[in-house]
Image (spheres, rainbow, N blue to C red):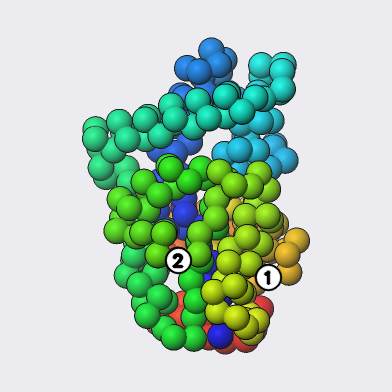
Amino acid sequence: MKYIIFDIDGTLTNTTDIDDKCYIESFGKYFNVSIKDISWNQLKNVTDWGITEELIELKCKKKSTKPDIENLNKLFLKRIKDEFKINKSNFNEIQGATKFYNFVKSEPELKIGIATGGWEETATFKLNAIGINPNEVCFSNSSQFKKREDITLDVIKQLNSKYYENPDEIIYFGDGEWDFRTCKNLNIRFIGIDNNNTGKLSKIGAKEVFQNYKKPNIIMNSIKSSSR
């Protein structure tokens, strides 16, 4: 048995650009300050919770509060929904993602989880847009945890509780440098999705990288192999 854990933005959904746009606009509107000069790689915890907390300290020169986090979350979700109404094509899947996800889900020896740095409400909305219901599988996000490692460990804990046995291997599909680093920190296998074919994941040491899911049999053979 193997655990297959998926990230969302840039891994299952082709929503990285629209997600960033909506977050930047929402933060600017709520706090009346621009964060367009910030690269997520500059930040310690690349999750919606972590990014928000760090940017409030950096740009607003104050500590974040629970109301700040909650209100920005609501504004961000509204912005995402508004963009969906304007242009649904901004909420497409990575090519072949939904079919591959369902393929993995149908394999008895593979158990699925979803671990995202996004807040629960926006993450669920984006997955629903491509026909995936995260509540059908073990799911964790930044509404519960600030650190990506904690989010991933929570999914693993849920899977362990559900299936009552330790997996032979844990594999995480992700698209970000932070996903790769999280997997290294947790000593779990990483398979990269480089949708724009930038080569960024290979450059930082990722050994298994696919552009999309258009060749599911090749990816499945990689999953079922024991090599790292």
Residue 179 locus on image (x, y percent): 62, 56
The image quarter containing residue 183 is bottom right
Work out whether residue 101 or residue 20 is closer to the camera in this orientation and state it.
Answer: 101
Residue 140 locus on image (x, y percent): 55, 55
Work out whether residue 172 or residue 140 is closer to the camera in this orientation and state it.
Answer: 140
Q: Is residue 46 above or below residue 182?
A: above
The answer to whether residue 199 of the structure is visible from this angle is: no
Question: Which residue sits furthest top?
Answer: 32
Give the class, few, some or many, for how many residues have Cα within 10 Å of label 2's Cα (few <14, many ≥20): some
Label 1 SS? loop
Work out whether residue 131 or residue 164 is closer to the camera in this orientation and state it.
Answer: 164
Q: Residue at image x 32%, y 35%?
A: 81
The image quarter containing residue 65 is top right
Q: Residue at image x 71%, y 18%?
A: 62
- Which is nearer the N-term, disc 1 or disc 2? 2
Q: CA distance from mark 1 to mark 2?
A: 19 Å
Which label sits on residue 188?
1
Q: Is residue 76 above or below residue 14?
A: above
Work out whether residue 98 or residue 202 is closer to the camera in this orientation and state it.
Answer: 98
Give the class, few, some or many, for how many residues have Cα within 10 Å of label 1's Cα (few <14, many ≥20): some
Question: Which residue is disc 2 drawn over?
Answer: 137
Residue 84 locus on image (x, y percent): 28, 38
Q: Is residue 29 above or below residue 168?
A: above
